[in-house]
C-alpha cells in the first residue's frame, strides 16, 4: 500500500503552502488551545480575528502560548458535519477516534492510544467539559450539545490536567449564558431521513443571575442494510437527546459562581459490523454450516459498500448520563483569584449487538456498566504583574467507581457448544490525590520562561469474576482445570467448578476456581519546562519539554486462566517539542511544530503463550517505544470573503524494546521491534475553503468545500496484514445563503461526495474479522436561526 499522500492531496497542500509562503514567507505551529474568542470587528474587517485561548486555564492570546492545539468553533463543527466524538477526527489531523468491539470510544493523538475492551480503561487522551473531567471515554456521548468550540491540546498535559493525558486532552467549551435575551435553533435533515435539532434560550433572570437552557435531539436514519438472501433488515437509526442548564451568578464584583447541569440519553441502534473474513479458533473446517449461507469460512464477503452489513437483529443501546459541575471564582485581590471546581457525573451504559457480521449469528456481545465519578479541585491563580510572574497552584482529588459486566453468547462458535456464555464481571475503583503548580515568568519583553510540576498518588482496586451460569460452562472450565491437575500436579479431578461460581482456572498446583482481587498504589511526578521567544509581536519561537503518565491498568476480559489477570505498570511519556507561530496582519496565521516522544511501559492487549490452551489474551507493558513527527497548520484570507484553512500532521511510531514473548493470531511468536502503534497513520491532513459574498441587500451567498485524509495504518500492534486499514480521502461540499448580520443561515451540503468506501477499524471477535465502516455519501440541508447580539450568543 502507498504510505504517502495521494497526488490530489499533495497538489492541494503544495499549492496552499506556496500561497502562504508567498504571502508570509514563514511557516508556523499548530494552534494552541482554548477560549477561541474572536475580535468583534473580525468579520467586519474581512480578515482573521485574534484568538484568545485558555489552554493553560487562563485567557491568553494564541500567539503567546508555546503549545500545539487545534481549535474548532461551532460553525466549523457544523460545516464539517461533526455531531459526535467519532467525527472529530474529520477536522483535527492526527486525532483518531475509533470504537472497540463493545462500541466504547478510543482516542488517539499522534499515535498514543490505549485499546482495551472495557469501560474502566483509563485513556491516553483526557476529555473535559469546561475543565470538568469526563475521565472515561464512554462518558462523552453528549459533549457536543450547544458548544462554543472544541479545543484539542496535543502532547502530554499532565501538569495542569493530571494522569491519563499523555497523548493530549480535549476540552469541550459550552456556549455561556448571556446578560441579554438570546435564542436560536439549528435543524438538519439528510438523505436517510435522519432529523437533528438543537435549540437554546439564554438571558438574565435577575441583575446578578444569567441562565442558558439548551436541548437537542437526533432521530431516525437507518443507513445500514443486509446484503445476502433472506429478510431485508435495516439498522443505524438514531434515538438520542441531551439537555443542559447553565447558571452564572455574580453576587459581587469579586465572586462568580457557575452551575452546569447536563444530561443525555442514547437509545440508538449500534453500528453493525461488516464481515471481513474468517479465522476459526478451532482450525479450518471447525465452523458450523448454516444453509444457505454455508459456514463463516465460505460466507460471502460484502460489496465495497459502507451500507452493506449482515445481521440477524438490530441490537440495542441504552446510555443515560447526568453531570453537575459547580465552579466558584473569588478574587482575593487584584492579583490573586481562588477557584473551586466540584464535579459529579454518572453513566449507565448497556449495549447489545451481534459480533460477527453474518446471518449465522455466531456471537452476541453485551456489555453493561455503571461509572460514577466525583472530583474536587481547588486552585489559586496569581498574576503578579510587577515582577512579570503568573502562576497556578492547587490540589486535586477524584474518586471513580466502575462496575461492568460483559456476558458474551457464543451461539455457533467453533470451540464451544451452542449457547455457551462467558460472563465477565468486575468492580473497579480509583482514588487520586494530586498537588500541582505551574508558573510563567516574563524574563524580558521577548522571553517567557515556564515550568510546572504535579505530584500524583493513585490508589486502585479491582475484583473480577468469570461467572458460570450454566452446567456447560462449569464443565468446560472444570475439564480444563482437571487437565492441568493431571499434567502438572499429578492430582485427581475436582468438582469445585459448579454453576454460580467463578470459573477462571486458578494457579497451580490445585488449579481451583479463581476470583481475582487486588489493590495497588502508584506515585508519579508530571512536569514541564519551556521557553517562548517573541522575535517580534507577530512571530514567536518556542521549546517545551514535558513528562506525563497514564495510570496503571487492570485487565477486563473473559479470563480463562489466572495469569491473564493482574495490573500493568503506569505509562510514562517524555515529550520534546519545538515550534514557531506567525501572523501577518489579519490575512494569515501559520503554525508548525516538531515533536519527539520517549515512551516507557506502553500498555497493550496482546496474545501471550499459555500451557495446554496455546495462547491467551492479556495486558502487557512494552518497555520502550517512540513517536515523532510534525504538525503544521495555516489559515489564509487572500481576499475579502475567501478563507482557506489547511493542516497536516506527520506521525512515525516505532517499538524499540518489546519485552515479554507475544504471539500472533496463529499462535506464532511475534517480534514487535520496528512495529508501528495501532491507529497511528503516518500522514493526516485536512483542508477547508469557503467563499462568501453579498448577493442581495443583507443576504450573503456562500460556497465551501473540505477534505480529510488519513494514510494507511494498522488496527493492531502485531501489524498483521489482516489488520491493515487502507489510506482514504473524502471530500465534502456546501452551498447556502446567510443573513449578513448572522441571524440565519440555510445550507445544502453533501458529505463524502465521491462515496468513498473506507473503514476506520478492524477487530477479531473470535472466528471472524469485522470492520466498522465510514459513512457513505450523504446529503441534506441545515437551517440555523439566531436572535440576539451578533457574535455573543454562542452561535
Image (cartoon, rainbow, N blue to C red):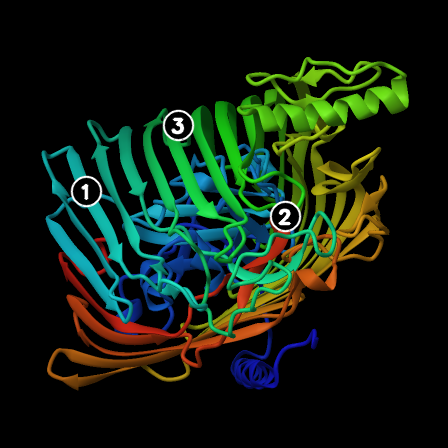
Q: Nearer the viewer, residue 244 or 14?
A: 244
Tag in front: 1 or 2: 2
Instruction: Tell me which residue sits at (70%, 14%) in the image.
Output: 495
- Crowding around mark 3 (Cα neighbors within 10 Å: few <14, some 14 to 19, many 20+) is some
Compared with 689, 208 (above or below) is above
Q: Could you tell whether 789 is left or right of 474 in the image?
A: left
- Crowding around mark 2 (Cα neighbors within 10 Å: few <14, some 14 to 19, many 20+) is many
SS for dot 2: loop
Q: Earlier in the sequence, mark 1 or mark 3?
A: 1
- Dot 2 corresponds to which residue? 766
Q: Could you tell whether 241 is left or right of 518 in the image?
A: left
- Crowding around mark 1 (Cα neighbors within 10 Å: few <14, some 14 to 19, many 20+) is many
Residue 345: x and y in percent read 38, 29
SS for dot 1: strand
Separation of disc 1 and disc 2 at Cα?
A: 48 Å
Q: Nearer the viewer, residue 622 or 493?
A: 493
Q: Quadrant of residue 264?
A: top left
Q: Quadrant of residue 477?
A: top right
SS for dot 3: strand
- Dot 1 corresponds to which residue? 212
Q: Earlier in the sequence, mark 1 or mark 2?
A: 1
Q: Nearer the viewer, residue 702 or 136?
A: 136
Residue 787: x and y in percent read 12, 58
Q: Does residue 391 appear anywhere in the picture?
A: no
Separation of disc 2 and disc 3 at Cα?
A: 50 Å
Instruction: Tell me which residue sits at (89%, 22%) in the image.
Output: 488
- Dot 3 corresponds to which residue? 339
Instruction: Tell me which residue sits at (50%, 29%) in the image.
Output: 405
Q: Does residue 333 appear anywhere in the picture?
A: yes
Residue 704: x and y in percent read 35, 79
Residue 490: x and y in percent read 90, 16
Tag in front: 2 or 3: 2
Amino acid at each position: 500500500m502507498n504510505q504517502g499522500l495521494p497526488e490530489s492531496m499533495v497538489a492541494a497542500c503544495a499549492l496552499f503552502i506556496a500561497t502562504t509562503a508567498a504571502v508570509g514567507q514563514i511557516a508556523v505551529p499548530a494552534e494552541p488551545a482554548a477560549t477561541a474568542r474572536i475580535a468583534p470587528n473580525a468579520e467586519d474587517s474581512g480578515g482573521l480575528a485574534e484568538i484568545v485561548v485558555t489552554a493553560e486555564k487562563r485567557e491568553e492570546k494564541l500567539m503567546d502560548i508555546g503549545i500545539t492545539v487545534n481549535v474548532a468553533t461551532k460553525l466549523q463543527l457544523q460545516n464539517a458535519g461533526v455531531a459526535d466524538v467519532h467525527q472529530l477526527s474529520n477536522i483535527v489531523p492526527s486525532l483518531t477516534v475509533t470504537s472497540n468491539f463493545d462500541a466504547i470510544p478510543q482516542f488517539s493523538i499522534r499515535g498514543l492510544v490505549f485499546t482495551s475492551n472495557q469501560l474502566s480503561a483509563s485513556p491516553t487522551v483526557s476529555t473535559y467539559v469546561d475543565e470538568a473531567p469526563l475521565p472515561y471515554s464512554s462518558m462523552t456521548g453528549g459533549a457536543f450539545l450547544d458548544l462554543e468550540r472544541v479545543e484539542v491540546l496535543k502532547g502530554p498535559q499532565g501538569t495542569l490536567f493530571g494522569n491519563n493525558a499523555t497523548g493530549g486532552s480535549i476540552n469541550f467549551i459550552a456556549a455561556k449564558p448571556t446578560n441579554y435575551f438570546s435564542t436560536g435553533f439549528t435543524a438538519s435533515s439528510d438523505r436517510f431521513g435522519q432529523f437533528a435539532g438543537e435549540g437554546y434560550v439564554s438571558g438574565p433572570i435577575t441583575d446578578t443571575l444569567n441562565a442558558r437552557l439548551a436541548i437537542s435531539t437526533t432521530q431516525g436514519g437507518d443507513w445500514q442494510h443486509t446484503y445476502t438472501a433472506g429478510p431485508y433488515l435495516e439498522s443505524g437509526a438514531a434515538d438520542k437527546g441531551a439537555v443542559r442548564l447553565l447558571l452564572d451568578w455574580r453576587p459581587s464584583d469579586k465572586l462568580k459562581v457557575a452551575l452546569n447541569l447536563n444530561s443525555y440519553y442514547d437509545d440508538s441502534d449500534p453500528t453493525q459490523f461488516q464481515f471481513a473474513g474468517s479465522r476459526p479458533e478451532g482450525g479450518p473446517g471447525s465452523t458450523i454450516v448454516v444453509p444457505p449461507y454455508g459456514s463463516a469460512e465460505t460466507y460471502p464477503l460484502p460489496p465495497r459498500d459502507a451500507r452493506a452489513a449482515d445481521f440477524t437483529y438490530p441490537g440495542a443501546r441504552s446510555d443515560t448520563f447526568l453531570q453537575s459541575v459547580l465552579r466558584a471564582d473569588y478574587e482575593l485581590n487584584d492579583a490573586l483569584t481562588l477557584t473551586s471546581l466540584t464535579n459529579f457525573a454518572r453513566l449507565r451504559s448497556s449495549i447489545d449487538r451481534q459480533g460477527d457480521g453474518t446471518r449465522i449469528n455466531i456471537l452476541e456481545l453485551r456489555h453493561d456498566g455503571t461509572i460514577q465519578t466525583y472530583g474536587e479541585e481547588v486552585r489559586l491563580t496569581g498574576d503578579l504583574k510587577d515582577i512579570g510572574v503568573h502562576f497556578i497552584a492547587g490540589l486535586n482529588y477524584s474518586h471513580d467507581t466502575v462496575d461492568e459486566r460483559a456476558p458474551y453468547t457464543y451461539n455457533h462458535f467453533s470451540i464451544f457448544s451452542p449457547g455457551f456464555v462467558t460472563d465477565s464481571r468486575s468492580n473497579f475503583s480509583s482514588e487520586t490525590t494530586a498537588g500541582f503548580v505551574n508558573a510563567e515568568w516574563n524574563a524580558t519583553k521577548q522571553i517567557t520562561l515556564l515550568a510546572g510540576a504535579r505530584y500524583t498518588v493513585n490508589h486502585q482496586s479491582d475484583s473480577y469474576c468469570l461467572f458460570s451460569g450454566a452446567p456447560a460452562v462449569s464443565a468446560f472450565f472444570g475439564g480444563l482445570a482437571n487437565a492441568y491437575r493431571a499434567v502438572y500436579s499429578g492430582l485427581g479431578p475436582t468438582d469445585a467448578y459448579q454453576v454460580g461460581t467463578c470459573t477462571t482456572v486458578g494457579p497451580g498446583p490445585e488449579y481451583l476456581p479463581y476470583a481475582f482481587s487486588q489493590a495497588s498504589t502508584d506515585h508519579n511526578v508530571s512536569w514541564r519546562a519551556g521557553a517562548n521567544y517573541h522575535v517580534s509581536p507577530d512571530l514567536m519561537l518556542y521549546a517545551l519539554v514535558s513528562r506525563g503518565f497514564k495510570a496503571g491498568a487492570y485487565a477486563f476480559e473473559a479470563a480463562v486462566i489466572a495469569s491473564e489477570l493482574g495490573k500493568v505498570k503506569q505509562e510514562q511519556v517524555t515529550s520534546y517539542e519545538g515550534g514557531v507561530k506567525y501572523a501577518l496582519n489579519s490575512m494569515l496565521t501559520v503554525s508548525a511544530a516538531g515533536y519527539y516522544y520517549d515512551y516507557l511501559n506502553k500498555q497493550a492487549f496482546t496474545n501471550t503463550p499459555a500451557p495446554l490452551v496455546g495462547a491467551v489474551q492479556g495486558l502487557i507493558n512494552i518497555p520502550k517505544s517512540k513517536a515523532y513527527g510534525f504538525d503544521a497548520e495555516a489559515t489564509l484570507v487572500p481576499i475579502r470573503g475567501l478563507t482557506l484553512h489547511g493542516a497536516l500532521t506527520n506521525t512515525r511510531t516505532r517499538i524499540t524494546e518489546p519485552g515479554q514473548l507475544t504471539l500472533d493470531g496463529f499462535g506464532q511468536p511475534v517480534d514487535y521491534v520496528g512495529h508501528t502503534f495501532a491507529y497511528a497513520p503516518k500522514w493526516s491532513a485536512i483542508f477547508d475553503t469557503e467563499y462568501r459574498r453579498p448577493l442581495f441587500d443583507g443576504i450573503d451567498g456562500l460556497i465551501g468545500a473540505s477534505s480529510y485524509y488519513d494514510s494507511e495504518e494498522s488496527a493492531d500492534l502485531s501489524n498483521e496484514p489482516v489488520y491493515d486499514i487502507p489510506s482514504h480521502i473524502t471530500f465534502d461540499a456546501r452551498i447556502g445563503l446567510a443573513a449578513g448580520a448572522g441571524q440565519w443561515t440555510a445550507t445544502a451540503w453533501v458529505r463524502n461526495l465521491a462515496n468513498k468506501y473506507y473503514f476506520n477499524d478492524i477487530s477479531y471477535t473470535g472466528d471472524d474479522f469485522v470492520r466498522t465502516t465510514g459513512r457513505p455519501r450523504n446529503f441534506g440541508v441545515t437551517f440555523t436561526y439566531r436572535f440576539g447580539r451578533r457574535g455573543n450568543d454562542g452561535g
